[in-house]
Amino acid sequence: MAESIEETAGPEETAGPDGTPGPAQEPAPAPEGGYPAARLRLLQDEAAIGPDRRAALARMTDDWLAGLLHRHATAAGLSGTALVAVGGYGRGELSPRSDLDLLLLHDGRADRGDLAALADRLWYPVWDLGLALDHSVRTPAEARKAARDDLKVQLGLLDARHLAGDTELTGALRTTAYADWRESAPKRLPELHDLCQERAERQGELQYLLEPDLKEARGGLRDATALRAVAASWLADAPRDGLEAARTRLLDTRDALHLTTGRATDRLSLQEQDQVAGALGMLDADALLRQTYESARTISYAADVTWREVGRVLRARSVKPMLRGLLHGRTAGKGERSPLAEGVVELDGEVVLARTARPERDPVLVLRAAAAAAQAGLPLATHSIRRCSAATTTRPLPVPWPAEARELLVTLLGAGTHTVPVWEALEAEGIITRLLPDWERVRCRPQRNPVHTWTVDRHLIETAVRASALTRRVHRPDLLLIAALLHDIGKGWPGDHSVAGETIARDVAARLGFGARDTAVIATLVRHHLLLVETATRRDLDDPATVGAVAEAVGSTGTLELLHALTEADALATGPAAWSAWRGGLVADLVKRVTARLAGEPRTDARDADEPTAEQERLAIEARRTGGPVLALHARSEPATGTGDGSAPPDREPVGVELLIAVPAHRSPGRRPSTSPAGTPGVLPAAAGVLALHRLTVRAADLLLLDPVDDGPVLLLRWRVAAEYGSLPRADRLRADLVRALDGSLDIPARLAERERAYARRARAVLAPPPRVTVVTGSSRTATVIEVRAQDAHGLLHRIGRALEKAGVAVRSAHISTLGANAVDAFYVTGADGEPLSDGAAHEVAAAVERALQ
């Protein structure tokens, strides 16, 4: 068999075979049939665009090259040869300046010199026309060997298409190429994945670049081709919805770019975007970029899903046959399901719906699944997202949203970097715009300011990611995260985006179910999200009018605190040029001055205890009479939404349970009552531990001290709880465990530690900010306020209560709230004498609690 004629690199763009540059414009007609003139007419025909023009150009080129081979092979008396198109040309996709990928295939019987002469007679006419050429001359065996040695060659052969000559040669090559690929795919697909990731790191993500490379960037044409190769392996397949349309739009854009520039370029430069948009019949460059970003986002999402499935399949195939045999009939193919939330489980490294989940009857399920996935750092399974997507169409969330849905959105936003892939998956399936219709105007919207790294929608999510790391600095993490999500929502509307955004933010906050006061704070944050950085860097801070204007705009120290954190998160999410130590110092100085100006005003987030209700007083009397804890459970419900078919909705749907616990407290002579009766665990840590053991999630709680009768005070704990999985425990079992916890016979710390070890074996913890415990000065004249901000977790409240008990302080009242994944708890404590703690003692207590939580 003859040796291979070595493959040589084709000249760059319009260079000839000797490497000298050729003309940049379309070449003049040359004497080879009518191909050059016909090609020029086709490219100048404004009616022939898109896939039809690419296919027509490919057919025209096929006929021309087939004629060349037939004429010169016949003249040389050569048989056993075939001309094969590979790569993009093999797919029949020729853009105006695309190169030609050609393989001269032969059976090995021809003389080497004759083959070289034939190749010259094929390649030189191509170069003479100024067309780029990638060429090789090989036998089928040599082509297979080259494919084994070079993944790119192997991928090119998957698109091999016969042009002229011996059809059996081409057919045999295609058959063996596909067989070789399917046999080697388990080893070569990881290599292909690595190439895709390396290219993405080098070129960036097409969906966010101001000057994207349509071919090489992540989400571009190379990735679409890689997905075709994965499908050809028969191991996995990409989601088909919208994928071919996205690829076609990118090809159309590249066609227009080639014609506009007269060059074989794939980079969509800023100065050429308006012309390309005009050639495609679009309004302007922004419309072009938005369509390009949408296409890239579709391809990127398909790639993420496909490569995840490839990994799953390859992991399954790596299990030894003997082990598979041992598992057969017991656990093979079933997988272990680990519960994450109600109706949501982990299976094979993905978050899926539980077998009993009914998204069509549970409109909150999609947010519950998303929040669980983000908190666990796991992807959402595509089939589960699509089930939820169909359900959100037939049965959307009620407006305003129920409290659980709002809290789950906050949890999703507060999960840090894990929020991004989950949000993108929801957006790819159209769920985000159904949940938040105003999102449509900012989706894939480009930002022309080069300081910005992201599109508007991705910038909003990145701001929430940055804000999640700052939640320990603010009293209302939920308001910070929602404001981060909405601060640039007005960029989809004309005029000042801050002004437009304020109105939209009010509507969205009300839709989410926030009260009037919280809605006003969110709207203020959106309206003034640029106020601090612009004032700090552009105004004289020594001028009293400057500080006064900011104080008037924000209105309260609580809002100022939130605005400070939002300002930093916004800048960090914009890009490296938007934030620096200098800017941060100026903003901090301004915040300090404004805080001083607002110092005399009451805190908007003051946590004053409500007056007890008649039922609470009744429970307190009963607890004192019996000498033990008394419990009451009340299911809370909201009207259900309509069924969508015109029929009447069900009566009401449960959304949570209110749990009241009344426990007699002890009073030492001359002292205020304590929550830590001598010789027994404190009521607060005991009750919190029992709830944690019974898998009850505490969404909100208050601890009140009542004096219903003359013979002693009673502690009343008012909880809003929900079961993590399944149904609520029985009240009598709760009471029995609480009695045991209070008399010391139930070792809660040991039980909780065992539970934590079980979770740790399979949990993927979110990288959360460390807990922060502070002394809130000026909030109470009769007690010291200790505020705890930490990641919500099993037994957290129990640990806090034990730490306060060990510190020797009495908890006079407590105000516990869970805001998404964040716990923000305030404890009003006193010393043994019933008086507020000294500054030194208060800070020692805060430090002790913080150490206990680390």
Image (cartoon, rainbow, N blue to C red):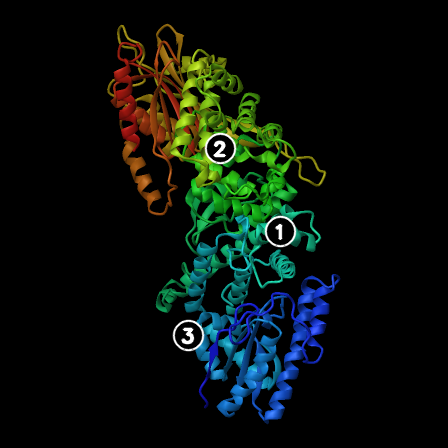
In the rendered structure, which amino acid carries the disc numbered 1?
Gln
Q: Nearer the viewer, mark 3 or mark 2?
A: 3
In the rendered structure, which amino acid carries the disc numbered 3?
Asp
Q: Nearer the viewer, mark 2 or mark 1?
A: 1
C-alpha separation, residue under disc 1 versus residue under disc 3: 40 Å
- At 56% from the left and 41% from the top, the residue drawn is 456
- At 72% from the left and 73% from the top, the residue drawn is 38
Q: Which of 533 and 640 is in front in this view?
A: 533
Q: Earlier in the sequence, mark 3 or mark 2?
A: 3
C-alpha separation, residue under disc 3 versus residue under disc 2: 51 Å
C-alpha separation, residue under disc 2 versus residue under disc 1: 35 Å
Residue farthest toward the right in the current orientation of the protein: 47
Q: Earlier in the sequence, mark 2 or mark 1?
A: 1
Which quarter of the rendering shows the C terminus?
top left
In the rendered structure, which amino acid carries the disc numbered 2?
Leu
Element at badge 1?
A: helix
Name the residue tied to disc 1.
273
Name the residue tied to disc 3.
149
* Label pair 1/3, CB-CB below 8 angstroms: no
Where residue 481 is drawn, which disc sits there?
A: 2
